[in-house]
Structures are given as structure tokens and as C-alpha cells.
Image (cartoon, helix red, strand yellow):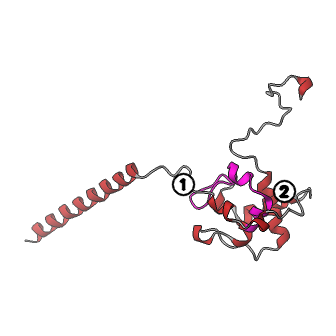
Amino acid sequence: MTARILKLAGSAMIFLAMTLAFATAQENTLAPPRKNAFDYTQLAKVPSKAAMRRNPIENDADSVAAGAKLFDLHCAECHGDMAQGGHKAPSLLVRQVQDATPGTLFWLLTNGVVRRGMPVWSKLPEPQRWQLVTFVKSLAPADRPQNPPDAPNDPRPPGDR
């Protein structure tokens, strides 16, 4: 009797394991790829007065480096070491982010996007939030060439550079 119960239990375990494996395989084949699962609609929801704010430290030579340190400390865990995005947060290299005004990025940093998992960073001092904006704006968008205009592979003749 005990052997029969153990045999039935073993069969049930095998059946459950196969069912779970099949369900997981089905889920993976039916689910759309998460390549760019994030949307950037929050950028358009920033109040126009906030979006028009100018970055008071955008020309400060040390702002990018300071912003990079702050990014590593506060943002890289979700947005990735190179701001390329990750499972928790979108890429900051995309055209939508790079084309956003500094005021838009500052507002999003200050207020967060809590429903999407981005914390409110209003406790960071304002100059540090502007340094983060300066750093993010210094990144090259994913669809923009990384080469400067005078790079050796520049197709323009040397006199036109």
C-alpha cells in the first residue's frame, strides 16, 4: 500500500513539473519581447512651466562629472551603468529623453514616476538634481553617431569639416 502511494505521489510530481514546464514555455513564446517595454509618455505630461526651466549649471565644466557620480550612486541600479536601461527602468539614451528639455528632466527627477517605480528625488539638493540632468543630457542618444564631426571616417572633405 505504501509503495502504491509513493508511486502515485511520484507520478503526480512528474505531472506537475511537466505542466509547469509547458506553461512556462507557452508564456515565453506568447509574450511579446521586452526589448523596449518602457514608454516615455511621462515626458509629455510635465507641466509646460516646469518644462521651460533652464538648467542654471549647464555650462559648469564640473557638472557632468559630478552628475556621473550621482548617477552611479542613485540611478545606475535601475537605469544601467551606461544609462542603457534595464529590467527596472528605461534607457536614458533614447531620442525621447535626449530631446527632452532640461526642465522636463529636472521635473521628473524631482517628482519621480512613482506608478512606474521611479522614486521621488526631491530630497536631493536642487544643484545635485541639475547635475544629474547635465550628465543625462551629455549622453549620446542611441540613434546618434558617436563619432565627432572631424572623425577620420567623416565622409566630408577635409576643407568642409
- The answer to whether residue 152 is above or below residue 66 is above
Q: Earlier in the sequence, mark 2 or mark 1?
A: 1
Q: Indicate the position of residue 122 as horizontal and vertical percent values.
A: 75, 75
Task: Give the label on residue 64, or none.
Answer: 2
- Extreme left residue here? 1
| Picture quadrant of residue 2 | bottom left
Main SS of the magenta part reads: loop
- Extreme front residue here? 48
Q: Residue at x 80, y 60 (%)?
A: 102
Magenta-tinted stretch: 83-107
Q: Amino acid at mark 1?
A: Ala
Q: Nearer the viewer, residue 125 or 4?
A: 125
| Picture quadrant of residue 128 | bottom right
Q: Which residue is mark 1?
A: 37
How far apart, in angstroms, are the residues tagged by discs 2 and 1?
28 Å
| Picture quadrant of residue 41 | bottom right
Disc 2 element: helix
Q: Residue at x 76, y 56 (%)?
A: 136
Q: Badge 2: how crowded within 10 Å, few (<14), some, or many (20+)?
A: many
Q: Indicate the position of residue 152 as horizontal and vertical percent values.
A: 82, 27
Q: Amino acid at mark 2?
A: Val
Q: Indicate the position of residue 126 as horizontal and vertical percent values.
A: 83, 72
Q: Nearer the viewer, residue 153 or 7?
A: 153
Disc 1 element: loop
Q: Is residue 94 magenta?
A: yes
Q: Residue at x 84, y 57 (%)?
A: 65
